Amino acid sequence: MNASVGPWLLVVSAMFVGSSVAGCTAAEPKPPASVASASVGSAQAPVSERLSETNEKTATVSESTMSAPAAPTGQLVCRATADGNAHQIFLEWNGDTAKGTLRTSTPSGMVRLEPIKAERYKARIIIDDPTSEDLAVHKATLVEDRKGKQLQMGDHTQPWTQCN
């Protein structure tokens, strides 16, 4: 065997053997408890501190991303459950017209925020998309009568739902 190939072959062989042993934890012998605590104890403290700091940062990030979005601006006009979804309507009035947000929460936990516009018409609040020019199709209709506030999502064929 050539002398220049020998050391490289040993290094490559050691790398493959080392990587295969590293993946197999059952074959790895454990040192006695006294040796493990004496030799690893001082080196383990900084690692565990770094791990706890990382876990704290991860928990903070996941808590902030997992929480529902903050309530939109404006007054909560209606909260109702229709078509299997929970709807909240927030409006900021300026005379007889308003701008606001329709917040829809699905049963799976997804929350969707949609901008809306609203106007008062014959004791009703008509809610549309901000860009809608259609006078016949509405996103929702809100009415207050002797039964209290009621919400109708979509067109007139949809059922009325009591606001909470």
Image (cartoon, rainbow, N blue to C red):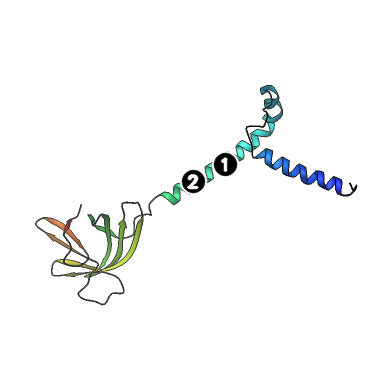
The residue under label 1 is 53
Q: How many marks?
A: 2
Confirm or deny contact between disc 2 and disc 1 (CB under 8 A): no
Residue 125, by quadrant, is bottom left
* Viewer-nearest residue: 93 or 10: 10
Residue 3, which numbered label?
A: none
Please state the horizontal and vertical placement of residue 8, each as a whole percent of the image: 83, 48
* Viewer-nearest residue: 113 or 123: 113
Q: Amino acid at mark 2?
A: Thr
Can residue 95 be seen in this snapshot?
no
Q: What element does badge 1 sit on?
A: helix
Name the residue furthest front.
1
Q: Amino acid at mark 1?
A: Glu
Name the residue furthest left.
146
The residue under label 2 is 60
Residue 37, by quadrant, is top right
Residue at 27%, 57% (x, y): give it: 88
Please state the horizontal and vertical placement of residue 24, each as a whole percent of the image: 64, 37
